[in-house]
Image (cartoon, rainbow, N blue to C red):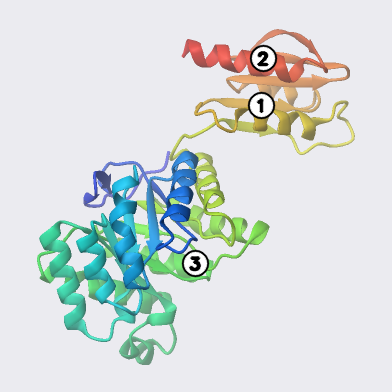
Amino acid sequence: MIKRRKTREITLGTLKIGGNNPIVVQSMTSTKTHDIEATISQIDRLIKAGCEAIRVAVPAKEDAEALKEIVKYSEVPIIADIHFVPYMAFLSMEAGAHGIRINPGNINKKEIVRDIVLEAKKRNICVRLGVNSGSLEKHLLEKYGYPSAEALAESALNWSEFFESLGFYNFKVSIKGSDVIQNALANEIFAEKTDTPLHIGITEAGMGTQGIVKSSVGLGILLYKGIGDTIRVSLTDEPEKEVEVAYEILKSLGLKKKGIDIVSCPTCGRIEVNLPNVVKQVQEALKDKDLSIKVAIMGCAVNAIGEASHADVGLACMKGGALLFKNGKILKKVTEENMVSELLETIEKYYQEV
């Protein structure tokens, strides 16, 4: 079992982060925030996918003004993403944003950062303090020669100390880079020296297989070491996909349960059924079900009985049909034509019993 790093508890709206609270899955809308209808529509889809906190871009005044209606509508906390125009942070807080994300390296004057922090403190608004290689302070670049993990961690620690010197503790830190190893090292260095909650992710991970693998490895390294209080999988894809992948990463490490955990074999020349089709049918039928059980769908006798018997419900396929398992015991033999419907019926009954 993974022992999570002990961090202080902070609040984002009504959401508790850090401490003994579960890891929070976040994403970000890809709409123009001032397009309220499109933004709310995407927020709905993200919430349906299981997203627990949503960030929206606020580059201009019209976006900040739209926050009033968006925040009022959303069932989950809304975080305003601020870059280069610090005035948007004040407008976003005034509009009711539950949190703001700032990168001090993109704000020219420390006094402005101070004013933002003090305003957040006054309104009890959560701040995400962002640090990345593209906005590292000049003196740290000169000290380390390049945006090293040590430089990133030092920047995050310096700004954290500044926030705390103002009596402000309701913040989390994100140290992000596109290099998996550098990203992991920077977060580890920071985590060893403070109890500040960490938001983790791999920025600019990419799309498709590359993006998913890069994010999974990068997040997996940190999560296995107990690091991470909120996460985002950054993909060049629909935001809902980010949420789906985030939950799969957390499920694979036993850190969060959402949806059915389907185990299936990679197939080989021994299988006698169209296993990929069976798995796809089951996934499609259960995609909107919030069931926390393990289902095994195995293609032949080599691993089928052993693997299926360790799942809550399972199929051990063979020529012409399959053995249907529940809690490690064979229920009956089913035909190939009926195996999917029989499995789904058994899953439904299992869920009603637990």
Amino acid at circle 1: Ala
Q: Determine whether the residue tagged by mark 2 lies in a helix, strand or loop.
A: strand
Amino acid at circle 2: Phe
Q: How many marks?
A: 3
Question: Which mark identifies residue 296?
Answer: 1
Classify mark 1: residues with Cα within 10 Å, few (<14), some (14-19) or many (20+).
many
Seen at 88% across and 19% down, the residue is 319
CA distance separating discs 1 and 2 = 9 Å
Residue 334, quarter of the rendered image: top right
Observer-nearest of 313 and 270: 313
Q: Which residue position is annotated with label 2?
A: 325
Classify mark 3: residues with Cα within 10 Å, few (<14), some (14-19) or many (20+).
many
Amino acid at circle 3: Thr
Seen at 22% across and 62% down, the residue is 93
Q: Are marks 1 and 2 in contact (CB under 8 Å)?
A: yes
Classify mark 2: residues with Cα within 10 Å, few (<14), some (14-19) or many (20+).
many
Q: Are marks 3 and 2 in contact (CB under 8 Å)?
A: no
- Residue 201 placed where, x, y %? 46, 60
> Farthest residue toward the top?
332
Q: Determine whether the residue tagged by mark 3 lies in a helix, strand or loop.
A: loop
N-terminal label among 1 and 2: 1
Seen at 58% across and 61% down, the residue is 214
Seen at 36% across and 92% down, the residue is 142
- Residue 104 placed where, x, y %? 29, 77
CA distance separating discs 1 and 3 = 34 Å
Specify whether 21 is left or right of 121.
right
Q: Nearer the viewer, mark 1 or mark 3?
A: 3
Q: Which residue position is annotated with label 3?
A: 203
Q: Determine whether the residue tagged by mark 1 lies in a helix, strand or loop.
A: strand
